[in-house]
């Protein structure tokens, strides 16, 4: 199956399942036509393999009607010309993360060490409580289940220390820019940790509000329905016992979600399995991985008597831990993988989500 078959697949679903899909997504297949002059036909055949496929392109536009995120899929774009930069020489003695105790700052409450990682205070901070989790293994593509379990447990101990230092810091985010193509400023593998104060980070809060509104309007759990409609579309999977899917309203190519009840070893194993499949079977070489969740701690200074999972008096009921991975493209690509259309209108995705789902093998 490929993405161009999605609208027909949804139209053929039983009425109740089709209605559930259409509560969340709008999917439309359109044709984009152009004319290839005789002077370009040889080049077009060599580059794209078919004149007909170029002159009548199949494009699928998917919009999430709950969050108002969306993607425009045209797999033909994977064959468009792309300039490459020469391979950069490996850094020569310039890996500041190789000796973190001597070459990096530390948080005011000290460092947290794991078996395979250590924290360092972010020297160019993006929040009051943010840190870098430096992996002992410098290669971002070389990791095991044991590594990820240790990264997660060390991150939780860092979050507890940060919360103790600042009780209003309760909103944990865990981010990993996998390689320079993923946005890492230092090639040595590392993750970013943030514990937001008082209010959630904007995109997390936007998702929480959208899910709450969906529940208020339909009586259904948004995240449960989101998994179910992706199952109906043939894009769902299971990893380490957790539900996941290749996202139809993708932010970037191979946008893959894992839904979990906790930031724990089971999620670490699922993230490992998905990332390893994307690297080994889908050819991913630069990626971003992120994990968001409900507040990790009760905000003791807000006057709230609610239990953990509630910030202030705002309900986070039903909000899961969400791990998300996207492909950031070739490390040698000269042009960025993000353009004006992605920023200002709707994301344009070259890769077919069904090819990603097949590559997962889960």
Image (cartoon, rainbow, N blue to C red):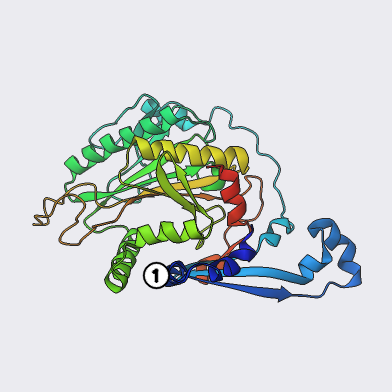
Q: Position of residue 298 (x, y in %)?
A: 16, 49
On the question of residue 52 being in view, the answer is: yes
Q: Residue 82 vs residue 244: left or right? A: right
- Answer with the quarter of the image where residue 108 lies: top left
Compared with 217, 359 (above or below) is above
Give the quadrant of the N terminus.
Answer: bottom right
Q: Position of residue 309 (x, y in %)?
A: 21, 52
Question: Which element is circle 1 on?
Answer: loop
Q: Residue at x 39, y 37 (%)?
A: 268
Q: Residue at x 42, y 38 (%)?
A: 240
Compared with 193, 6 (above or below) is below
Q: Residue 255 vs residue 330: left or right? A: left
On the question of residue 340 being in view, the answer is: no
Q: Position of residue 152 (x, y in %)?
A: 35, 36
Q: Position of residue 97 (x, y in %)?
A: 45, 31
Q: Residue at x 53, y 46 (%)?
A: 287
Residue at numbered disc 1: 66
Instruction: Decide which of 85, 356 is in the foreground and name it.
Output: 356
Q: Which residue occupies the extreme front position in the image?
A: 14
Count of numbered labels shown in the rendering? 1
Q: Residues within 10 Å of mark 1 (few under 14, many from 20)?
A: some
């Amino acid at each position: 199956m490929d993405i161009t078959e999605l609208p027909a697949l949804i139209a053929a679903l039983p009425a109740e399942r089709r209605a559930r899909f259409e509560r969340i997504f709008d999917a439309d297949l359109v044709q984009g036509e152009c004319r290839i002059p005789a002077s370009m036909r040889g080049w077009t055949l060599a580059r794209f393999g078919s004149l007909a496929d170029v002159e009548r392109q199949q494009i699928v536009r998917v919009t999430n009607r709950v969050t108002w995120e969306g993607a425009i899929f045209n797999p033909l774009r994977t064959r468009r010309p792309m300039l490459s930069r020469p391979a950069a020489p490996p850094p020569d003695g310039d890996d500041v993360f190789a000796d973190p105790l001597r070459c990096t700052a530390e948080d005011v409450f000290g460092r947290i060490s794991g078996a395979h990682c250590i924290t360092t205070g972010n020297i160019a901070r993006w929040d009051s409580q943010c840190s870098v989790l430096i992996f002992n293994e410098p290669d971002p593509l070389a990791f095991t289940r044991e590594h990820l379990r240790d990264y997660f447990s060390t991150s939780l101990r860092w979050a507890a220390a940060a919360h103790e230092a600042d009780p209003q810091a309760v909103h944990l985010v865990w981010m990993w820019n996998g390689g320079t193509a993923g946005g890492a400023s230092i090639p040595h593998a590392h993750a970013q940790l943030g514990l937001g104060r008082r209010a959630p980070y904007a995109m997390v809060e936007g998702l929480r509000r959208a899910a709450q509104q969906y529940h208020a309007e339909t009586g259904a759990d948004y995240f449960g329905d989101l998994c179910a409609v992706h199952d109906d579309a043939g894009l769902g999977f299971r990893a380490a016992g957790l539900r996941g899917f290749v996202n139809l309203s993708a932010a970037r190519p191979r946008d893959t979600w894992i839904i979990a009840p906790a930031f724990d070893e089971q999620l670490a194993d699922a993230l490992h399995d998905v990332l390893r499949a994307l690297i080994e079977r889908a050819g991913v070489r630069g990626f971003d991985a992120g994990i968001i969740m409900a507040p990790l701690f009760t905000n003791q200074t807000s006057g709230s008597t609610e239990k953990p999972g509630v910030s202030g008096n705002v309900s986070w009921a039903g909000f899961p831990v969400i791990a998300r991975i996207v492909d950031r493209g070739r490390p040698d690509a000269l042009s960025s993988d993000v353009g004006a259309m992605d920023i200002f209108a709707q994301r344009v995705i070259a890769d077919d989500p069904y090819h990603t789902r097949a590559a997962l093998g889960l």
